[in-house]
Amino acid sequence: MADQASNPGHIAEPTPAIEARGVSRRFGDKLALDDVSLAVSRGQIHALLGPNGAGKTTLLRTFLGLIEPSSGRAAVMGVDSVGSPVALRRLIGFVPAGDRSFYLRLSGLENLIFFGRLHGMPRRRAKERALEVLETVGLADAARKSVSVYSHGMQKRLGLARALLIDPAALFVDEATHDLDPEAADNCRNLVSALAARGTAVVWTTQRVDEVRGFADRVTLLAQGRVRFTGTVPELMAHALPRRYLLHLQNGGLSGEGARGVLSHALGGLGSIFTTAEDSDHYLLALREDAPLGDALAKLREAGFQLIGCRDERSGVEEAFLALTRDEEPA
Amino acid sequence: MIEAVQPQPGRLANAARELAKLPAFARRDMLVAWSYRATFITDVLSLFLQALLFYFVGLLVDEGRLPEFGGSPVTYMEYVTVGIALAAFLQVGLGRVAAALRHEQMIGTLESLLATPTSPATIQLGSVLYDLIYVPLRTGLFLLLIAVGFGLDFNLAGVPPAALVILFFVPFVWGLGLVTAAATLTFRGGSAGIGFGLTIMTLASGAFFPLELLPGWVESLASLNPMAIAIDGMREPLLGVVDWNETLRGLAVLLPFSAASLAAGIVGFRAALRRERRRGTIGHY
């Protein structure tokens, strides 16, 4: 503060909508969260990535005020999670993991009216709002059906509808897509993206590394309760292991092991090439860290091979995830 | 920057806002109960069958050994019906209060409830509100059904003082239920404890037989059993004559038990919830 006061040209950074600062949480001997910090601005989707047991759900529960941190602080819009848990929950929407968070004997509409009333809405307003959000998530036709007949995807959308009831400043989504088919998962992500576009700060926990690309603005990677990485998705991918590509090449006469020697020679020092099976036209290309893929492919073409296909053996994000979570020390 | 800048509404406004949420809980539980229509019907039917059982047992009882009420003898059926009603009231009420949050924990909705801006006290009260209304109504319905079905001669003028006794007994049941709920939340079990405690309390209540049949020292202890006090307080006006002085004396004895039970329940339950939050195990079951 003193620095800012003495520097009139300084523009103060806005308060993050969601902020954890040095949050640690111990359960007996196990340190579930170890000095975790993160900040999410309004309108930003922040993916909380990590393997099982990394501490993602514990951090989420800390933000919701369901768990008190052993040290450090968590806050939403400046409201502390321990000091003012009820005030905090007026600001947040929460989509829990799993399906069991609704009264299955009640309809989707009645469930939402109930939760709307717990957010302080009078019954008539709660019903109006419930119908609006059911329409938003595409469940208007199933509004009066018992939740017990809803599919996984429908229950997830209902979970999002519940979070939308209050037009939250911050949204916490816990493993929303882990048991959904690709279309339903995409549907969920689109709904959340639309909400973020209206200014909601989102924390999205997942262990599906492929879904953060093109969806999350920033990523925090947790492993064993510690932050291993924080940054953008491209920055995360920079931590990927040496890139490998599956190539489909044709040369008329040569294939398999016979072609491999020619290809290897053509590549020079750019990387290594391996056959995937005897007499196959498919090869595995492992590029050196700084070698451009385009240069390598050009060399192979110059050696008389026609490139039929080329694809990542594994996504860069997944590579980074594995590289960072295998490390003993944080990156 | 983490700065708590949210303006806090006054206590009264907060309390009013929390109270306004209670009907939502009652509606939710009524709708859920209504979705199990068969359970509701079998519940009433089983009460009737229980009364039928005691009717046949009553044929073997020497009614001369039963106490008189208002100077008049009573049949065993009349005597035991009030006992059955209150025992069922205690059993159902206690069981449901104790199990309300456990049930939320088991079906997975507790975390979602606690993630709303609703105080834990409202969630607890809301979760049992329907039962606090339904169980006394069920007791009244039972007494009515038995009176009509078995031709019992209840004193209608005794209904208001009997209802007042029930009203004073409700906080006792609620408090005991909260203590049990706290134990259940902490130890993830407790139904065995409830069953044992209920059996002891019912045995020493005079619900099914006069306390005079118990050994002298047990009878003295049993006279301090809130359930025995409540049953006596209901039997006198319903089976004998209305004596408001006697009723008020009974209520004066019952009141400290109810107040103590409720206070212990609220303190115990808050402590259990705080412990769960500290340990981070609130959604576990």
Image (cartoon, coloured by chain):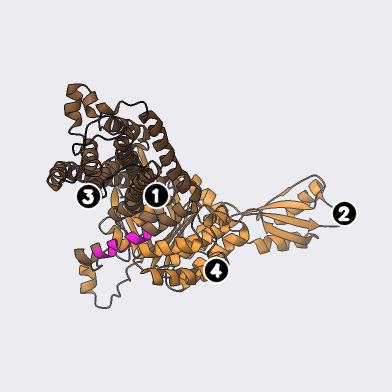
Chain colours: A orange, B brown
Q: Are marks 4 and 3 in contact (CB under 8 Å)?
A: no
Who's the residue at 59% across and 52% down the image?
Answer: A242
Q: Which residue is mark 3?
A: B164
Q: Residues within 10 Å of mark 2 (few under 14, many from 20)?
A: few
Image marks 3 and 1: residues in contact by CB distance under 8 Å: no
* Dot 1 alpha-carbon crowd within 10 angstroms: few under 14, some 14 to 19, many 20 or more: many
- Residue, x 36% and y 51% (percent of image)? B134
Density class for disc 3 (Cα within 10 Å; few <14, some 14-19, many ≥20) is: some
**How far is mark 3 from mark 1, CA to CA?**
48 Å
Label 3 lies in what chain?
A: B
Please give the residue where the numbered disc 4 appears in the rendered image: A140
Magenta run includes residue B20: yes
Residue interval drawn in magenta: B16-25
Name the quadrant containing residue A162. bottom left
Q: CA distance from mark 1 to mark 4?
A: 33 Å
Q: CA distance from mark 4 to mark 3?
A: 48 Å
Residue displayed at 20% across by 30% down? B222
Q: Which mark sits nearer the N-terminus, 1 or 2? A: 1
Q: Amino acid at mark 3?
A: Leu
Q: Is residue A319 above or below residue A16?
A: above
